[in-house]
């Protein structure tokens, strides 16, 4: 009997810098009430969810991501919402940024070309802030935030006693700096 292949739970994401994570986490703590706020260090925007993936494919995933060409762009997080069916409070752009949609399309095309499976549901840009929420009634007012997107990341989900921790494995930079 052969040993089971090592696997990782992976996704590609935009990963905010520490200052933006802090601003999002501060609002999240106020909005959470009795619900479960996202931990500051886990706040991100998923581009492509891969799920449980053979660890032998990590190098291929890196090649796919390096093949994606995009310019830095500004993403405005100017609205907050609540998805009742998922019990999530989230934030995101009011108008989908063309640069973000193009980045997701290019990443998914690279994954498709390499035969890599991912969750192919239509992309809806959002940053999950609170889980198991009962609504937005007690949430503080939302102040729009600017996110200077300069790269994206391959991220692994690591279970721990404190809950799931997301760990950036590799970053893939935009073509040029702001």
Image (spheres, rainbow, N blue to C red):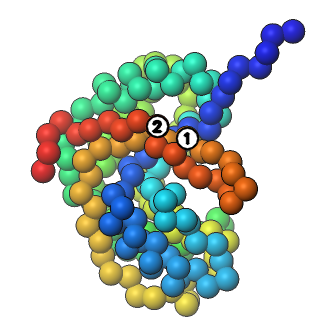
Decide: few, some or many residues near mark 2? Use Cα within 10 Å; few <14, some 14-19, many ≥20: few
In the rendered image, the vertical position of residue 122 relative to residue 20, given as above or below: above
Quarter of the picture containing the N terminus is top right
Looking at this view, name the residue that lies furthest to the top. Answer: 1
Q: In this orientation, does residue 67 appear?
A: yes
Decide: few, some or many residues near mark 1? Use Cα within 10 Å; few <14, some 14-19, many ≥20: many
- SS state under label 1: strand
CB atoms at circles 2 and 1 under 8 Å apart? yes
Q: In this orientation, does residue 48 appear?
A: no
- SS state under label 2: strand
* Relative to 36, 90 lies left or right: left
Q: Count every numbered label the image shows and give the total.
A: 2
* Residue at x-position 38% and y-position 49%: 14
Identify the residue position indicated by label 1 in the image.
Answer: 156
Residue 153 on image: x %, y %: 40, 41
**Front position in the image: 28 or 73:** 28
- Label 2 to label 1, Cα distance in Å? 7 Å
Residue 54 on image: x %, y %: 62, 24
Residue 156 on image: x %, y %: 55, 41
In the rendered image, the vertical position of residue 136 relative to residue 39, given as above or below: below
Residue 53 on image: x %, y %: 61, 29
- Mark earlier in primary sequence (2, 1): 1
* Residue at x-position 51% and y-position 57%: 42
Identify the residue position indicated by label 2 in the image.
Answer: 169
């Amino acid at each position: 009997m052969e040993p089971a292949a090592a696997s990782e739970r992976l996704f590609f994401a935009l990963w905010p810098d520490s200052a933006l994570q802090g601003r999002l986490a501060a609002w999240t703590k106020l909005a959470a009430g009795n619900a479960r706020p996202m931990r500051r260090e886990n706040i991100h925007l998923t581009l492509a969810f891969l799920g449980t993936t053979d660890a032998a494919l990590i190098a291929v995933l890196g090649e796919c991501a390096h093949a994606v060409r995009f310019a830095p762009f500004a993403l405005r997080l100017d609205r907050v919402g609540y998805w009742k069916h998922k019990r999530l409070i989230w934030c995101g752009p009011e108008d989908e940024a063309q640069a973000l949609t193009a980045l997701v399309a290019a990443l998914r095309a690279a994954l498709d070309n390499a035969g890599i499976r991912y969750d192919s549901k239509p992309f809806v840009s959002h940053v999950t802030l609170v889980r198991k929420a009962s609504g937005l009634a007690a949430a503080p007012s939302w102040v729009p935030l600017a996110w200077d997107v300069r790269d994206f990341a391959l991220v692994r989900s690591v279970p721990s006693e404190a809950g799931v921790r997301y760990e950036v494995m590799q970053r893939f930079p935009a073509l040029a700096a702001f």
